[in-house]
Amino acid sequence: MATALLLLATMAATSSARGDESTPAARVSAAGNPSPQLLSDFCHGCHSGKAPKGEFRIDDLAADVTAPQDRERWLSIAERLRSGTMPPKGKPAPERAEAKALSDWIVRQVELAQRERNPRQGRAVMRRMNRIEYQNTIRDLLQVEVDLQGVIPDDTTAGGFDTDSASLQFSSYQLDGYLTAANRVLDAAIASGPRPRHVQRRVDLRNESITQRRDVYRHVDDGVAIFASDLASNIQVVFWNFLTRARGKYRYRISAYAYQTDEPILFHINSGTNNLGEPPQLIEYFEAPPGKPTVIEFVEQFEAGRNIRLLVDTEMRPRDLTRQGGAADYRGPGLVVQWVEMEGPLEEAWPPPSHRLLFSDLPQAPRDGSDQREVRSEQPLADAETILRRFARRAFRRTVTDDDLKPFLKRVQKQLEHGQSFERAVRVGLQGVLVSPEFLFLRERIGAANHGARELPPLETTPAVDPEAPGGALDSAKLDEFGLASRLSYFLWSSMPDEQLLQLAEQGRLGSPETLREQVERMLRDPKASAFTENFAGQWLGLREIDATLPDRQLYPDYDDILRSSMLKEPGRFFDEVLTHDLSLTNFVDSNFSFLNERLARHYGIEGVEGLAMRKVELPPDSHRGGVMTMAAVLKVTANGTTTSPVVRGAWVLDRMLGTPPPSPPANVAAVDPDIRGATTIREQLAKHRQTESCASCHVTIDPPGFALENFDVIGGWREHYRSIGDGQPVVIDGRRMRYKRGPAVDAGDVLPNGRRFRNVDEYKQLLLGDPDQLTRALAEKLLAYATGTPPGLADQADVERVVQAARKKNYGFRSLVHEVVQSNVFQTK
């Protein structure tokens, strides 16, 4: 295997100018190629042999930059040289021109390798739909909502997204899940039985046996007053009589009001089964105003066998209420519930739309004298072909041919020959379509003379790679119209293309720039675009990890489920606002507004916000909030349940906001665990950590953004001092002594690798805002990685720069950036 030194020697040999090996001129040829002497003089001493620094060996680094593992190692060398973190301080270092020559040479080799590969293999390998995309596609394909949790396995992520082709492998276990799912969704879509009985039932809580516990509940003239609930001890109002009998949408109405208080009372509704051992699922939090009864209504999709539970959210606990004498004489706030009503399933027509979508107006007849019904046909093979052709076109997301249909029609014909009914035979064909690779995989085909090549605008700056070099993105085969339709729909909707996209693809019109802009606008206005916020923003910001840790109750007693629910809503509402109004993406770094409710505003120390509803709030200048980095949800997912770490948060900022993720730490270096006993600060611990040579080069980049966020605690609250369970001063809040103590003071200042200093998060944000192009570049690359299933490579950088250039001309508007991403060659290339 060729090594790094051998490759450099070969490159240097092509140069006509050679100097003495001990001089700088010998380390870089006249042609600009670095020689092996560069690595030998400055890298080989530390990074070779049996115990290389950072477990990184130069002497066995393969020259083949096409292999992913070796490519990443080469690129890490280039990045360290560019940032000046290698060689470390105190060690001999190459001159700036020499370091640039080597880093540029590495980038050039990787870029050329990618340019050679892309036209042959494409940028992204074929991938299957992830679980969310599969469920959404089933919803839109068959117009049914079926809970497939536990049927289709959860997906892992790579590069931060569950759309990454590297993580979406296929196994026999998954195939078994898809077979089960196909049967389940066809059961839901085909109306084989009688119309489910429509139920409308109202209960008076005074008549429910569960409310007869007078130590917790008080019966009043018009209902039952609930003062305390506790899920752990099963003190909740379970509506056993509201068990759903069929899958469908159900409407619930609750008449309630706040009792013995002038303030609204919060409560929440969970759903579950009659097995209380199964974990409940939160439906939503609600608030009831004082005095006047108010009817609160919601509609929810349920499988059969579900009920609802009501829990009031007061500061009183059932155990404490009992100790104080029970509910009869309690004078604190509570919730009076008068009645609760359930109605459903809410079917507007029968057979439902899903059935008619498959079988159109074909008649049904009783099956074997039972109440079951099935579809009949006078021309079974002809009707089966019509059904399968119509279904396969939408399932395969393209025009289908006779050859495409043959295997499925053969299955239907075989079933008919064996005496199966028309409906059962067609169902076998439909199931075959649903487990076909053409359905499960996003098979992006290359177009011939479809939407063609477009003249690209010139770059205003010179990129690291030559955009006109042969084999680049401009020469790669572009997606055909159907592939483009699927890429667009799974990008913005996490689901299949709708009829308008398919028709435009069939007409060969989708790929024109004007049509694409029209379709992006239409799709972003569609309610299905909520998937873009939930799945892109949720993963970009790491919000899916919100429950990965539970804050320590001794240190953070102020964390509760209402705060959790509120903090999760803030980033999504903020993301939607920036997207909808094409606000500058710099708002993700700093903004003068956010979306808060009373609970979250109180957590942030912001006054004047009342009620449970999230609303746009102008932030006070001294709030230290604004942008996503200082949102409580983001701050929670970048901390564990006990402590914060500048390393974790710093790595998050470098990756998510700046697009420069740090390398993984060496395996033999222990992590730094903050001291919650208050004896040592994390800054003091990291200062010692930086003394380790293999750690210092990375921590000089990682730690500063992490320290900028140190004024925010585990749950995103502002702090001037750390909380301690050991040394420190007592803390008293509202006359109550806390179980934690006031620990050492927080120091949120630091210096960036380029020498720029900041004292706090506000100053750090301003430093980031000084380079909006880099913020745009980083976000564009995240969008492209999410949309295409693989992150942009060096061969794509010229196209990324064009996206940045176009966004700059539109004041870095985020909606404009989404448009430019879709218009890019990277998005439209296989």
Image: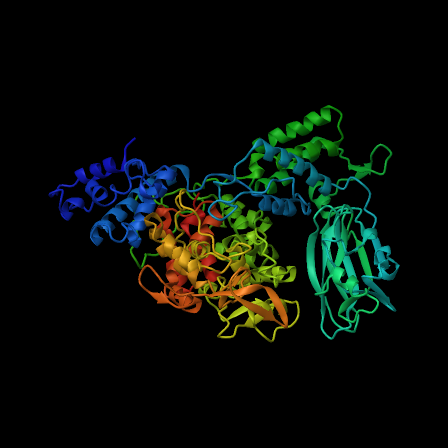
Q: Residue 596 at x, y = what percent?
A: 59, 68
Q: Is residue 802 visible?
A: no
Check the image and name the residue furthest to the left: 20
Check the image and name the residue furthest to the front: 727
Q: Residue 591 at x, y = what percent?
A: 48, 68
- Vertical relation: 288 (above or below) 231: below
Q: Residue 614 at x, y = what percent?
A: 62, 67
Side of 758 where 419 appears, left or right: right
Side of 363 where 407 appears, left or right: left
393 or 775, which is in the foreground? Answer: 775
780 or 691, which is in the foreground? Answer: 691
Q: Residue 369 at x, y = what percent?
A: 87, 34
- Vertical relation: 6 (above or below) 621: above
Q: Quadrant of the N terminus?
A: top left
Measuring 52% from the left and 37% from the top, which residue is drawn there? 169
Colour mode of the rendering: rainbow
Looking at the rendered structure, the number of numbered marks drawn on it comes to 0
Q: Quadrant of the C terminus?
A: top left
Q: Is residue 549 visible?
A: yes
747 or 352, which is in the foreground? Answer: 747
Q: Quadrant of residue 96?
A: bottom left
- Vertical relation: 670 (above or below) 600: above
